[in-house]
Structure formats: C-alpha cells, structure tokens
Image: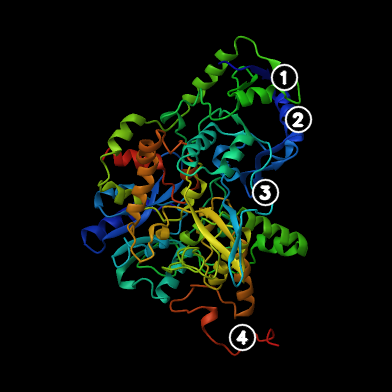
C-alpha cells in the first residue's frame, strides 16, 4: 500500500509543527542542562525536533517511564487492601511525538515484542496505540551511529507513523508510513501540498548521502553467527576491563527494558513502583540466598552483549540493539557496543 | 602539556623491571581527539599510551575494582587525581607499596569543545601531591576561590533556587553513574543502592533522587577533590559540582580552611576535633 507524500519548505514545516503542537498533546526534545529530553510542548519554539542525536535522550521514558507506580496498598488489622487505581491515570490520551529518530522509533518496535509476549503490558500497549511518531531522518550519521548495519531497513522503516526527510534540493518531504500516519496527515491542522513525482527519487538521494556518512559499518549476519559460539571468549574479560560499571548504558538505551519492583511505604500505606534496572549492576542477579551467578564484570558484559545481539534475535526474531549509539555517547569511558561485539566476534 | 613519550618510557621500564602487573593510562579515541582510560597488562600495548590536555578522566577510580585490587599498579595522576589518591591511601583503600605513581604537573585539561575545563579554573593544586616520579615543573598551590557557579546559584532568590534544584533532581534518572565514577565512592555496599538499602526506597522517583544525591554529596563533603568524574559520567549532564563545591565552601570557611587530600594522612574535616571549630549552631 502506498501512502501520500507531501512537500513543504522550512517555514512550512515549522508552521506544521506549530499547528500540531497547538492541537494535540505534543512532545519534542527540549533542552535542559545541555541535553535534550522529550518534554511536553505547546509551541515548537519551546523544543527542537532537529536536536543533535549526540545530545538527545531516548524517547523510551514516554512509554516506559524511569519509575511508574503499579499499585497502591493499605494494611489494616484484618487484611491488606490493594488498588490498581493510581492517581493521575497512567495511560494518556492521544499524543504526538516530534523529532524522534528512526533508530529510536525502531527501538519501540523492538520493545513491542517483549511487551506483547507472555504478559501483555496494557499500559504500554495503550500508550503505543495512542501515540503518533513523527520521525525526522538524520542528514548525517553521528560518530557512534551504526543503524544501517543492522537487521532492519532504515530507509523503508515502518516503526514510525510519519517521516520527514530534508531533501538535498532544499524541499522537505513529509511522508505517511502507516495508516495511522496517513489519517493524521489527512486531518492535519495546516493544509499540506502533495509532492511531485520526483519525491521518491529525492528521498532516495537523501538516503544515499546519509548512508555514505557512516563511520561504523559491519556485516550483521556474520557478527550474529560468529557471536553464537563466543560465549566462552576470553575477549569479554579484556573489553570489560575499562568499564566502570556505572549502568548508564542501560538506563539511556532505547531498548533496554529490565526493571525492578520496589515498595515505597509510610506506616500502613504504600505504593509499589516499577523502575529501571541494569544487568551491569552487581545486584541484578543477586539471589536471596546470597548466590550471584554473575559476580564479575565480564560476565555481566557478556550477558549485555549476547542479549543484544544473540538471545533476543533467537527468541523474537529482531535484534535488540538498534545502532543508535546512545550508550557510546553517554559512556564516561566511551565503550561502544559496536566495538565490543566486533572484537568478540572476531576473536 | 604533552608527556606521551615520557609516560611510555616509564611504563616500559616498569614492565621490564617487573615492578607492576597492570598500568593505567590514557589512550586516544580512534574517531575524535578525546582520550579514554586504558588498562594495560601486556607491554606490547604500551604504544597506545598518550598524555595531553585531553587526559581528563580521574584514573584513581580504577583502583577500587576487583581486577586492580591487590595488584601492583602503575598509574598516571594529575593534581586533583593525586589528591583523591591521597585520600584513598589515608582511608586504607590502597597500599602505597603496590603503586607506582607518575605525577604530572597539570596545566589544566580541556573539555569537549576545546575550552579549558571549568574545574581547572578554580583548581587549588595543579601539582601532584603523591608521586614516585614527577613530570613537568611544579607551579605551586593556588589560592582558594569560590566556584563562580556556586556564587551565581547562591544569588538566586530562594524560590527560584528551589525550582532550579528541583529541575536537577527531576532530570536525574538514578543510574548512579556519578557514584560509580567517583574514585572516593568505594563502599562495596552503598546506602544509595536501591537493592541493598532500606533507608531509601527503590523507585527512581524525584524524592528518591533528592535523597540519593544529597546523601551522596554529604558523604563526599570534605573529601571531594573536584575532579568532576561524576559530571562527565552523568548522562543527563546535571551540574553535580554545585552540591560538592557548596560543601567545600562551607567546610573551607568553617574548618580552618580545610581542603581535602592535600597532605598525607589528613583524616579530613569531619574526623578531627579542633578547639577553634565553630559551635554557634548548637542551641
């Protein structure tokens, strides 16, 4: 099925963004302390949908917040009362997210698999259904990016609903990628002009120029096959030596989805929270009896690398790493998962 | 400030003489001009070592890990790094005889944009205070200055300042990278670790961020050496130095101009009693 393509210019795009921000509950990267995070905006001037990828946090917290209440409880002499009605309903209304990257959007598509697996996370599903992702394609790859080297087609990705491409000819193309995106653009608060016949060609040209700007490239199939037999590779010890175990990589990863459950209790009442956790954390695998199957750093790193590139692919058919490079950008000692898997696979 | 050649020579001498098992230095990033730490066990890797004004990370952070503990370690320290090393020695976390320390007289490091790093502007001790070998010419102790950012925040009206700090705590994602990257945070069980702590709830809510960051900064009061490893590690780019520099200011003003880690075996402001210590806060 082919969807409509519209064309506009820089001012037209700003007007479109502004109208969207005025009409819907809109989120876009907003700068705080030199880092862009997705926040609620009402005017496009408050945010920057073209924020540099190196300084932008992932969009994951809008679907899977860093900490969310899952239930409330109250103890009295006879029984414990449990209620699922959390103040400020978890599932939101219709939302639009502007300025999301192709890799970030793919991250959500990857997360969908695990959230609709044995336990259906209704809150996550609801948020996904209610949200329209307007994705801007990067013009140039960042130094740590490698999205084009992985198992998904970045050019024709359907992880987002609408994609915006800055054509090399100065025109900006707005293309619906899903039915949801098509309907959203049809009801657009500003009238959009349908693009000419050359639009597909121009978008391809932009992709070619984008693709050629990558510093990091790898053969995904080969790496994935080689890694399957590298569980005992001594290289894991060498590559993890630099790691200071700070957990940042997992917290800012668009696809890391491990969480812990904890209770916040004052006297007889309390709230149960679900919060981010990381497999690089020493306590992550600590059992009640005191045994820890991953007591040393290289074993935790092995789990991280293998889960990203082997286990998830085996179970769900998609690679858990989307090649956004957020981990390498935020790592205080610049460890890149790209380098790790390449070194281990070729050891 | 380029000591690449000297450091490589010293490292290879140490390995040939069998004095060390592991050498901790800096290596060049392959794709930009920043440097990252490197831990060398094989003398063949020595050519990787570099040192320039991009050698930012405080390497004494690595002394707390299982793969360096109780090993003979050679490492490079700048002024601030050597102060944290001094504290680790005082607090009996590392053995002096296990270390071979190359001290560099620091002329200030640069940040990602090539400008002089902010902590170097208010540095009190650019020369190493612990070393076996010294590189460069010592320039001596500098007078203490209040951090300009701290002074600016102190000028804000109370409500505005509260909002500013709330913004900081809201942006905290509780990854604890600040804690992990701090050379002086070596406890095997930490009170801000959600898993082991009963003091703090396990959630990543704003209130837990307030608890964690304030407790953490209070544990470092009178100990923080302003290397700003925590800020480099923070994925949200939070200005964590505001907490530490404020503590430093209070301690400097109230505890006989105490600065952490400047002299060997100095147990810090909170560990010693002095008759001149202020007591006007006692009712």
Q: Residue furthest top?
A: A197
Is residue B114 rendered to the left or right of residue A147?
A: right
Between label 4 and label 1, give the one nearer the viewer.
1
Residue B56: horizontal and vertical position, in percent? 47, 54
Give the residue at mark 4.
B277
Mark 3 or mark 1: name the one nearer the start of the chain.
Answer: 3
Q: Nearer the viewer, residue B277 or A303?
A: A303
Image quadrant of residue A308?
top left
Mark 2 or mark 1: name the one nearer the start of the chain.
Answer: 2
Where disc 4 sits, the SS reads loop
Do marks 4 and 1 share a chain?
no
**What residue is drawn where x is 67% and y is 60%?**
B165
Residue A295: horizontal and vertical position, in percent? 33, 60
Between label 2 and label 4, give the one nearer the viewer.
2
Residue A51: horizontal and vertical position, in percent? 62, 37
As measured in the structure, the alpha-carbon distance from the residue carrying label 3 to the one carrying label 1 is 35 Å
Residue A183: horizontal and vertical position, in percent? 67, 23
Q: Are marks 3 and 4 in contact (CB under 8 Å)?
A: no
Which of the numbered marks, if any, corresponds to residue A80? Answer: none
As measured in the structure, the alpha-carbon distance from the residue carrying label 3 to the one carrying label 2 is 26 Å
Q: Chain of mark 4?
A: B
Give the residue at mark 1.
A192
Give the residue at mark 2.
A19
Q: Residue furthest bottom?
A: B275
Q: Nearer the viewer, residue A328 or A215?
A: A328
Do marks 2 and 1 share a chain?
yes
Asked whether residue A278 appears in the rendered view, the answer is: yes
As measured in the structure, the alpha-carbon distance from the residue carrying label 4 to the one carrying label 1 is 72 Å
Give the residue at mark 3.
A89
Q: Chain of mark 1?
A: A
Do marks 3 and 4 share a chain?
no
As measured in the structure, the alpha-carbon distance from the residue carrying label 3 to the one carrying label 4 is 53 Å
């Amino acid at each position: 099925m082919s969807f409509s393509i519209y064309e506009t210019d820089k001012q037209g795009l700003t007007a479109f963004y502004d109208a969207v921000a005025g009409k819907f509950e809109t989120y876009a990267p907003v700068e705080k302390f030199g880092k862009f995070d997705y926040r609620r905006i009402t005017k496009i001037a408050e945010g920057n949908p073209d924020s540099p990828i190196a300084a932008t946090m992932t969009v994951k917290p809008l679907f899977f917040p860093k900490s969310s209440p899952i239930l409330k409880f109250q103890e009295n002499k006879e029984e414990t009362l449990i209620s699922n009605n959390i103040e400020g309903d978890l599932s939101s209304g219709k939302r639009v997210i502007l300025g999301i990257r192709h890799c970030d959007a793919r991250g959500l598509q990857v997360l969908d698999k695990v959230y609709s697996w044995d336990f259906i996370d209704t809150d996550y599903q609801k948020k996904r259904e209610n949200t329209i992702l307007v994705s801007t394609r990067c013009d140039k790859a960042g130094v740590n990016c490698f999205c084009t080297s992985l198992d998904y087609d970045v050019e024709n990705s359907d992880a987002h609903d609408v994609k915006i491409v800055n054509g090399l000819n100065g025109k900006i193309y707005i293309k619906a990628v899903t039915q949801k995106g098509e309907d959203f653009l049809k009801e657009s608060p500003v009238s959009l002009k349908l693009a000419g016949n050359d639009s597909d060609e121009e978008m391809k040209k932009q992709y070619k120029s984008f693709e050629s700007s990558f510093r990091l490239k790898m053969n995904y199939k080969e790496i994935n096959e080689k890694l399957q037999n590298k569980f005992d590779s001594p290289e894991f010890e060498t590559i993890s030596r630099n790691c200071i175990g700070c957990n940042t990589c997992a917290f800012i990863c668009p696809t890391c989805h491990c969480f812990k459950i904890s209770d916040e209790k004052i006297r007889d009442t309390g709230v149960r929270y679900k919060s981010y956790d990381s497999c690089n954390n020493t306590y992550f695998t600590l059992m009640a009896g005191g045994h820890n199957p991953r007591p040393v750093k290289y074993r935790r790193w092995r789990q991280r690398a293998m889960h990203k590139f082997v286990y998830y692919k085996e179970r769900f058919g998609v690679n858990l790493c989307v090649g956004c490079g957020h981990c390498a950008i935020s790592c205080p000692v610049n460890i890149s998962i790209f380098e790790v898997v390449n070194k281990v696979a070729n050891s | 400030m380029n000591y690449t050649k000297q450091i490589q020579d010293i490292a290879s001498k140490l390995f040939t003489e069998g004095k060390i098992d592991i050498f901790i230095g800096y290596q060049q990033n392959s794709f930009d001009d920043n440097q990252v730490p490197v831990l060398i066990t094989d003398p063949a890797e020595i050519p990787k070592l570099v040192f320039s004004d991009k050698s930012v990370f405080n390497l004494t952070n690595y002394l707390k890990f299982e793969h360096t503990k109780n090993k003979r370690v050679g490492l490079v320290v700048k002024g601030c790094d050597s102060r944290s090393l001094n504290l680790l020695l005082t607090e009996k976390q590392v053995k002096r005889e296990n270390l071979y320390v190359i001290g560099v007289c620091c002329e200030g490091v640069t940040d990602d944009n090539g400008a002089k790093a902010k902590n170097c502007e208010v540095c009190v001790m650019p020369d190493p205070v612990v070393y076996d070998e010294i590189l460069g010419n010592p320039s001596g102790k500098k007078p203490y200055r209040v951090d300009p950012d701290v002074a600016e925040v102190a000028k804000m009206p109370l409500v505005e300042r509260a909002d500013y700090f709330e913004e900081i705590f809201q942006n905290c994602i509780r990854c604890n990278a600040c804690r992990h990257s701090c050379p002086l945070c070596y406890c095997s069980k930490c009170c801000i670790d959600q898993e082991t702590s009963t003091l703090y709830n396990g959630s990543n809510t704003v209130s837990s961020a307030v608890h964690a960051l304030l407790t953490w900064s209070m544990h470092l009061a009178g100990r923080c050496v302003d290397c700003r490893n925590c800020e480099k590690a923070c994925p949200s780019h939070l200005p964590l130095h505001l907490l530490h520099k404020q503590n430093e200011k209070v301690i400097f003003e109230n505890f006989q101009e105490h600065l952490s880690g400047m002299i060997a075996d100095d147990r810090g402001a909170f560990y010693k009693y002095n008759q001149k210590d202020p007591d006007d806060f006692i009712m």
